[in-house]
Image: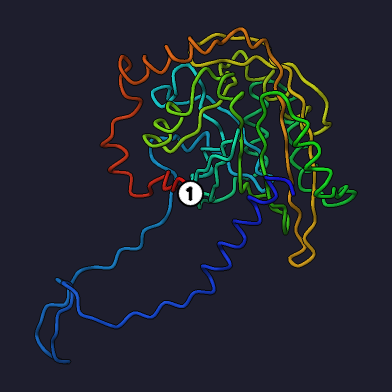
Amino acid sequence: MSNFLKNQKNIKEEKTICLSKSIKKEKRKNQYTIEFKFGSDIDVSKLKQIIQVNQQIPSYIPLDITFRLESDIMIPFQWNSNLQLGELAVDPISYNYRIVKYDKQQNNYVFYFEPIDRPFTPLQVVKNTLEKYHPSLGEKFELFHFKLLCKEKIAVATEKEIQEYENSIKNSFAVYIQKKQKGRITTLIKSINCQYLQLMGINEEILQDYINQTGLLPWCFSDENQQFSNLIQGMFQGACQQVNSSLQAINFNGQKFEVIITPKIFHTYNQEDDSYLQFMFFQQEYNQQIMTQNQINQNMFEYFNLKTKIINENIIEDDKIKRCKYRQI
């Protein structure tokens, strides 16, 4: 069976176990319990108030760039550079998801997500915003949006087909596993391999520390305004039509280079809840001589010893939402 199918099934089994467990707790008094007889003259306004806490995206990620869509399209707008890992951009998946678990399986790093609860953005708002960058972006975005949500003519793959493709991958890659159900797509898992880390110019130690500090994931594509249109068009057209595209990537050191992206999408169907699992693979081909192991080692030295910490730890401590609450296996 495909490793990524195993990961998804493990999540489902964990949730089932958690839901089936029955926990019984004896009632007990706590430090906020105040006993008084009905009709007494105790001032109840001084009792501890119950405050409802709503999950929101952390304040240090601007809300005006964090669109949330039913199609789960992730749009990489540029924002606070202080949160970036070196010269790498922030993965747009971090705008709408928090990491709940992180695992390493052989050559792959697997990240499990849960969505940050907030309202969906009207489609027209996103379309109008993209058209400010390029007149054709809004239309391409809209076509991609509805194509992703469409359940008609979905070719269902077998586990064997997914596993064979998975085993054939020799390049750097990223894969997104998403659930498509009732007109909505939710990302469950993202996985990258060691070659993807090399492309970014980092290693596992840097990645772990960055996640611990920020709860964010780094991204290897430049989000500069002059590259934004090409990046978005490449994402929409490439993923929608499953054709190769050439995009400009960037690494930890700020080196920019061309990467050939090869997308591949698979679907499996679950009859029990009438849902589809969508596997979106993106392979990256590039000149691997751009980043050597010696340079990565130097980057690690710079990150841990010379560079100012990416984000003040007080910000994370004060963030009651705790974007990153993963546990490492």
Residue 91, quarter of the rendered image: top right
In the image, residue 171 above or below residue 299? below
Residue 42, quarter of the rendered image: bottom left
The residue sitting at 71% across, 18% down in the picture is 285
Asked if residue 211 lies left or right of residue 267, the reply is left
Number of numbered markers: 1
Which one is nearer the viewer's eye here, 210 or 63? 210
Q: Can you identify the residue that label 1 sits on?
A: 100
Residue 318, quarter of the rendered image: top left
Residue 4's spot in the image, x, y percent? 68, 45
Tell me the amino acid under the disc marked 1: Val
Q: Secondary structure at mark 1?
A: strand
For this orientation, the residue located farthest to the front is: 106
Residue 160's spot in the image, x, y percent? 83, 46
In the image, residue 125 above or below residue 327? above
Task: Say few, some or many: other residues with alpha carbon within 10 Å of mark 1 (under 14 / 14 to 19 / 20 or more).
Answer: some
